[in-house]
Amino acid sequence: MREWNRKLVLQQIRSSGETSQIKLVKKTKLSAGTIVNITKELYKENFIRYTKKGASLRGRKPENFTLNPNARYVISVALFALETRIAIINLNEEILHKIAYPTKSRQGAKAVLKILAARVEKLLQQHSIPKNKVHSIAIAMEGSVDAEEGTLKISSHFGWNNVPVKDILATLLGLKTFVESENRAMAIGEYWFGAGKNTNSMLCVDIDSGIGAAFIKNGEVHHGAHNLEAELGHSLVFTNGEICRCGRKGCLEVVSSGSAMIKKVASSMTSERAKKYGITKKLSSFSEREAMRIIFQMAQQDDTVAKMVLKEAGYYLGLSIANMITYIDPEIIVLAGYVAEEDPGILLNFIQETYNQKVFLPDLRKTQIVKSILGENSVLIGGAEISYRDIFE
């Protein structure tokens, strides 16, 4: 009960911005004595700081205080097969320090996680942050994750199966560890702090080297009975075609993912066309984000192949999203990932056009399709929010 009361008070202080003991008594319905004891404890632990004396009709003026954003920190990690990003984030969701480096996932899970732990230790040392001020670390990964176990069940991106990420990192770093899928962490970030803020339900579609999705309703992200909900990239959109990384034919990822679009445009690129668009090296030698940026620029300049590839990708994305919406009917659809972030509106228009044609009862829906607000930081912010829930909820 004591821990529950403490979290309740912290949550109210966090949401209020500035408050007082009198206001906390009214909002939490806890006794004045309980509030006094908890706030004294929080002040000693540097969780809150006093700001000024508040107004009072009679008697002693109440002291106002706010949450100290640097009382604790969380480490948020976006662990992708190609790149790893690590951020130190304070209690105000501010990214204070961030680094990125190549993951080199072929080294294997244990080696990659050992390097990650060393990088975290070094980052904390560089910025003089003692580990006892770090509440926890949250890892968002590409693949199917059992968040409760903290295990990466399977990932075609990494080529890893049944990796106990939580146990490994908790042992290496000595920190409380949370593990979630990239798609769900991204959705959590956008729901609470981005394009989905102030909505009740949201579908977030992550379009990058693969395609994933996550559905949030009433603040809760859905996982499914087997932690496999919303694997949109592996929904079947045609009966044949190239083999997907998952080993099947006909997956959405084969036609609409960033890596698929880059592969198609790159295979058609002649030296003459490359010269026309100022491309000095093979498209496949750029990072996927840079390559997609070039493809969008080519489409804006009326390159036939680029426009055709984007139109095809947009059609199947629009069709797949329309099918999902028929089932779950959210208030908003948020497109995230590097493809959506680099899109000047071309792909979004193709998606919207198909969606409008294919969704069931479009005239009765007010569902908007919008782009991510947080951009590449959505995964890191979402990971931090997962950690914050352990502090405030």
Image (cartoon, helix red, strand yellow):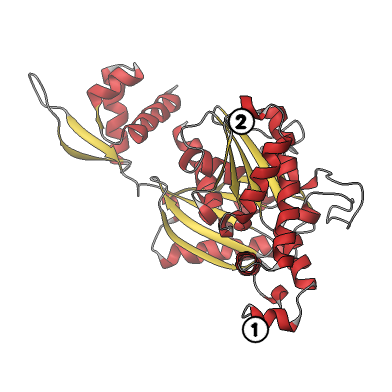
Snapshot quadrant of residue 276: bottom right
Would you say residue 277 is visible in this rendering?
A: yes
Left or right: where does residue 158 sit relative to residue 287?
Answer: right
Residue 150 visible somewhere in the drawing:
no
Judging depth in this view, the residue of 348 and 177 nearest the camera is: 348
Q: Amino acid at mark 1?
A: Thr
- Left or right? Give the position of 91 relative to 109: left
Residue at image location 27% in from the left, 33% down from the top: 40
Badge 1 vs badge 2, beta-carbon distance below 8 Å = no
Q: Quadrant of the N terminus?
A: top left
**Residue furthest left as drawn:** 58
| Residue on which disc 1 sits | 280
Q: Secondary structure at mark 2?
A: loop
Q: Position of residue 283 (x, y in %)?
A: 70, 74
Query: Disc 1 or 2, which lies upstream in sequence?
Result: 1
x and y, in percent, of residue 65 in the image: 24, 36
Where does residue 202 sit, x and y in percent of width and height?
Answer: 58, 35
Give me the C-alpha separation between circle 1 and circle 2. 44 Å
Nearer-the-camera pick, 10 or 328 = 328
Residue found farthest to the right: 240
The kind of secondary structure element at disc 1 is loop
Identity, as a three-letter code, of the amino acid under mark 2: Pro
Residue that badge 2 annotates: 330
State the image quarter where residue 80 is shown. Answer: bottom right
Q: Which mark is residue 242?
A: none
Question: Which residue is depicted at the point 29% across and 24% down?
Answer: 24
Where is residue 8, by image quadrant?
top left
Residue at horizontal 52%, vertical 44%? 189
Question: How crowded is the residue under tag 2: few (<14 C-alpha within 10 Å), some, or many (20+)?
Answer: many
